[in-house]
Amino acid sequence: MTDTNKTFRIIFMGTPDFSVPALQALIDGPDEMVAVITQPDRPKGRSKKRIPPPVKMLAESAGIPVLQPTRIRTPEFVEELRFYEPDLIVVAAYGRILPPSILDLPPLGCINIHGSLLPRHRGAAPIQWAILSGDKEAGVTIMQMDEGMDTGAILLPAAIPVEEDETAGSLFTKLSALGGTALMEALDLLREDKLHPTIQDDSLATEAGPLKKENGAIDWTLSSRTIHCLIRGMDPWPTAYSFLDGKRFRFFAPQLTDDRNNSGLEAGSIISADRNGLLLATGDGALLIREIQPEGKKRMRVEAYLCGQSLASGQKFLPQQ
């Protein structure tokens, strides 16, 4: 007989904003939060003031012990974890790969909230790559961790549709909340012995490696839809960009359109610029850009930029300076 009233002693490992809804759900839930492990405080801004991770701030406000090790593979740290006698370790965007000594420590193992529908988009930037790849559906996977990179057994997937104007930023917020909900559902199933692992099909796996600033350079000879996905997937970081007269312009809020490049202008050229936005030639037609960030300025609507500056038909944006 299963014990639906059973509670677990849980250690939570997480660092950024993505982890916060999951930790909050655990705090509000029936289980005992015995410790939180997060990355060390990092210097930020011009002042280089050390800022605590979002997870640390939430844990401290809830009175949960917080550990911020610089190294997690030492015998001393593993023994420190053992002191808390966890039944389970829950991980959400902690930022480091766990060694076997930690994976094998709790009786119920370690489970992770991964920001994709595994085996698709294994890696550090699954949410961005869901947009970049033009996925119609995204989600989170509660998974049993092993020594591989997101290769463990699937315990519970949860999916949502990707909207036409979805950005990596907006999807991040949605999946962060979904992760907390899915985690609590998984723990309830675990209590009832109904959480059954499904081995991933490695043949369906795709990689979602970390993004770099140079990944945002726009090749305007690509299709409108591909560029549309690039701009949304790079928003808010590292952003998609091109150069005009040696100055960098960042692009946001793209819109697919039925407009065509009937003028014969080269890809990257301005077809028109007005209060509706910036219509640019692409490899297979045209793409409307509604917001830009000129070099040294804030993000703004194209209409606002045109109040003080001009963009003429035929001017061409280039991927590099």
Image (cartoon, rainbow, N blue to C red):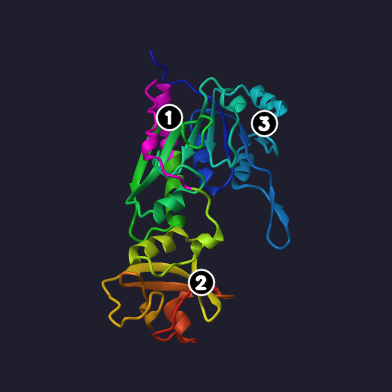
Q: Residue furthest top?
A: 1
Tell me the number on the disc at residue 171.
none
Residue 73 is labelled as 3
Badge 2 or badge 3: first in the primary sequence: 3
Residues at marks 1 and 3, CA–CA distance in whole angstroms: 23 Å
Residue 56 rendering spot, x and y as whole percentages: 63, 43
Q: Is residue 40 left or right of residue 215?
A: right
**Residue type pointed to by label 3:** Arg
SS class, disc 3: loop
Closer to the camera in the image, 234 or 6: 234
- Residue 25 versus residue 304 in the image, above or below: above
Q: Which residue is under mark 2?
A: 299
- Spatial CA span between label 2 and label 3: 43 Å
142 lies above or below 233: above
Image spot of residue 45 (x, y percent): 68, 61
| Residue type at tag 1 | Ala
